[in-house]
Amino acid sequence: MRTHIVEIQIQSRYYPIYIKIGGIDMINLLRFLRLFCILILMGLTILQPSPKPVMADVTIAVNTTTDELNNDGDCSLREAVRASITNSVVDACPAGSSSDTDEIVLPAGVYTLTITGASENDSQTGDLDLSGKMKLVGAGRDTTIVQGGAGWDDRIFQVYYQVAGGTDVTFEKMTIQNGQTPNNENGGGIHVFGTSNPDDVLINLKEVRLQNNRAIGDDPSNGTGGGLGITNAPTITILDSLIQNNSARRGGGVFVAKAEIKRSVFTGNQANAGSALYIVQNQPALIENTTISGNGIGSDYSPQNYVIYSDFGPTVTIRYSTIASNNTASNFGGVYLGTGQIILQGTILSGNAINSNCANFSSPITSNGYNLSSDSSCNTYLNQSSDLNGTDALLNPLGFYGKTLPHHPPKPGSPAVTSPGSSCPAEDQLGTVRPASSCTRGAVQNALALLYLPVVTK
């Protein structure tokens, strides 16, 4: 039998290692080499550093609708918030994380706040004070409701800037209602404290209903942001949400600076200025695929009003939205621009106030085309060849029409239907695809444009 001498050199990190084996036949040589390779691979696996464990977000499941802060063995919404902001166990709620996002889960139910005591900032009494990275997720805006109870004298939520790591708070799939600011403060439903840097505080509303909140206290001349109000300049994102029946002196629906609002509805809100939205500061704001309808003046306010009020230098872009049937007591019921800039594209302005869809005293309103105004007040500003002025949009009344959010569908024969060449969003307010060749002006795509498609027959 023929034998072989095997000599192996392994170059380690510090010095070479020699292995010399003599007098081995071919079969045993192959067995040896296979075993040797297995041992080497095992050694490499053992010597590799252990992977760093991935930290999961903390989930805090609320299991009672009672507003309480005690040690009775359950987890209320107030206790869950306390567990998150203190990063400690509170009653049966697990401790929140100091570095990751805490997700507070709210099953279907009505969560009525009853522990009164405004102007306290640790969620022990009054409103629920949030900071850090946090998500509050309900089961749906029709089934998870967070509200102020009888005699409630505070807003529902207040969000603060957390210096370490910033603040990023999301409200999702819930209704927030019946908030009332104390001492004529801001933000009836939600109040957000920001900084001069919009990236320090991020607030997200997804599939949320903000309704019946007031930021006027006992004095209608004060208070901003009936549904949502800000201090300084946090970044606000509102998606697929309904802002209705809120009131404030300024910004009945919302009072915001840097903002992105898409596929949402503002209706029934009231204010002295900016009944739906009041947009301020030198920050960009985008309103897209959004219906703004039925907002106006209330009995608490003096007879002047603007549905969208832009002031103190923002650049507001309104794309493929419908601003219609807003009722005010002044001549300026649609879009008002104090300082800054408003850019309109693919937007319908119809039947707002007394002969006035547009009002501008000191700054430009710019058209990017494909807009429609039912009166002549926008003639100076809607000056592109694709714009339509003094034209009835032929809209149906505001309603749900079997969908999840109210809207104004165009009637058959509406001039808003089919705007070839327009650069519109891929979907409309309801999530319906907008065909590039037949894009409808306003917040919703014309249903007929989708139904009557070419049919190929043999």
Image (cartoon, rainbow, N blue to C red):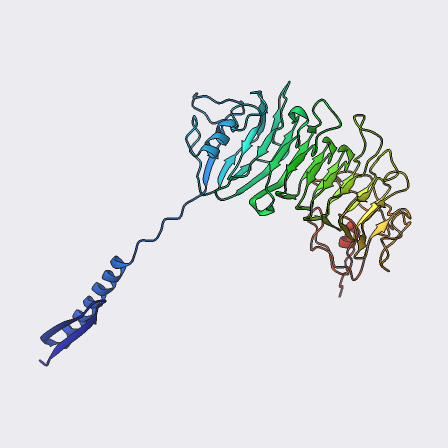
Q: Quadrant of residue 280?
A: top right
Q: Residue furthest bottom?
A: 2
Residue depicted at x 44% and y 36%: 96
| Left-right relation of 104 to 367 | left
Residue 59 location (% of width, % of height): 46, 37
Identity of the residue drawn at 25% across and 57% down: 46
Q: Residue at x 63, y 40 (%)?
A: 232
The quadrant of the image that shows the N terminus is bottom left
Instruction: From the viewer's side, name the closer residue of 322 and 446.
Output: 322
- Give the quarter of the image for residue 99: top left
Which quadrant does the C terminus fall into? Answer: bottom right
Residue 107 visible at all: no
Residue 195 screen position, x and y as percent: 59, 42
Q: Position of residue 371 (x, y in %)?
A: 82, 53
Task: Measuring from the top left, give residue 267's x and y in whole percent.
Answer: 75, 36
From the viewer's perspective, is 67 left or right of 324? left
The vertical placement of 200 against 26, above or below, is above
Q: Using residue 186 as the reference point, say whether residue 342 is left or right of it.
A: right
